[in-house]
Amino acid sequence: MMEWIYASLGLVILLLAGDALVKGAVNLSLRVGIPALIVSLTIVAFGTSAPELLISITAAMEGVPGIALGNVVGSNTANILMVLGIPALLARMHTSECDSRESYMLMIGATVLFIALCFFGVFTWISGLVLLAALAGVLFHSFHKARLHMAMGEEDELEEPEGADPDMPWWKIALYIVLGLVGLPLGADLLLDSAVTIARMFNISETVIGLTLVAVGTSLPELATTVMAALRRQADVALGNVIGSNVFNLLAIIGIASMVSPIPVDPAFLRFDLWVMLGASLLLIPFVFLKTDITRAWGVVLSVAYGGYILLVLS
């Protein structure tokens, strides 16, 4: 029982520390004159993925790479099936009004590249460079597209960076950054140690724990954001949140983690989990290209599919 409490505590610390780091870094960057556009595309994107990143790096360094890889693959599957499925049960998401084709194709490209690298059997520093180069390409494309919007006088379409507060005092900025930098490794260690112990208690692999407990836990911020977006009828925010998170998970998290330590690929990923992740990604085609809304019926389909996947993994 205590291990579950420690795991939950580690997860809460991770999520709160990640949020604090984002707020501190965003406001520090804006205060020193970094444009809001750069802050949105880099600091916010990396900051919101900080919990997954710390978990993956810590897992790779402590000899449990199954959790590192399982966290990313499981999170991407959960982001589509759970993070879009549950909010759709609460409110219809009008994705027919969104134009997410370009970002969706980037996500599919990142997914195919990630799967191809998995077939080499291990993510080395060379694999990390390939993923980070692809990430740099995605960021450059996003930056160029946003600059075009600004040049056309469409600044209002560009969202204000998450956590931005022009009146935040310096001491509060420093406090947020310190809490984030201290809390992230603390939460990662606590969650990882508890997850490994739970896996051994139930005689299941660390990979399974990464695909389920850790992946669901680190997907909770995306779920909260998407639920609020669905209730506010902001389907573009909901879909963009999922697509952006998946791209960063594949390219940034494993890219950086594999630069720190090699990450071997469990053969189980090649047989099943990677194809579930790809299949879940392809399920978005009707919503992206065919102007289909994510209705409550689709919410049931996505949620049931995720429940079935979790049962298969645990069995």
Image (cartoon, grey):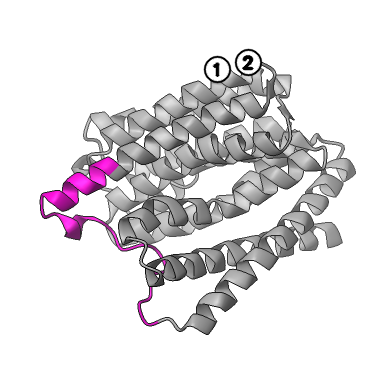
Q: Which residue is mark 2?
A: 119
- Amino acid on which disc 1 is placed: Ala
Q: Nearer the viewer, residue 125 or 33?
A: 33
Residue 274 sits in which quadrant?
A: top right
Query: In the figure, is residue 197 to the left or right of 19?
Result: right
Q: Nearer the viewer, residue 203 or 166?
A: 166
125 in relation to 11, above or below? above
Residue 230: where, in percent of width, then height?
34, 56
Q: Secondary structure at mark 1?
A: helix
**From the image, which quarter does the C terminus lie in?**
top right
Q: Nearer the viewer, residue 234 or 263?
A: 263
Q: Secondary structure at mark 2?
A: loop
Residue ranking furthest to the front: 32
Q: Answer whether residue 1 is visible to the viewer in this image.
A: no
Query: In the figure, is residue 288 to the left or right of 149?
Result: right
Which residue corresponds to the image point at 78% horizontal and 58% vertical from the top-left?
190
Q: Which residues are magenta?
A: 144-167
Q: Nearer the viewer, residue 256 or 229?
A: 256
Residue 211 sits in which quadrant?
A: top right
Q: Which mark is residue 116?
A: 1
Query: In the figure, is residue 116 to the left or right of 84?
Result: right
State yes or no: discs 1 and 2 in contact (Cβ < 8 Å). Answer: yes
Residue 96: where, in percent of width, then height?
21, 40
Cα–Cα gap, marks 1 and 2: 6 Å
Residue 175: where, in percent of width, then height?
58, 78
Query: In the figure, is residue 262 to the left or right of 24?
Result: right
- Amino acid on which disc 2 is placed: Phe
Q: For label 1, count other residues whose C-alpha is less than 10 Å away and answer few (under 14), some (14-19) or many (20+).
A: few
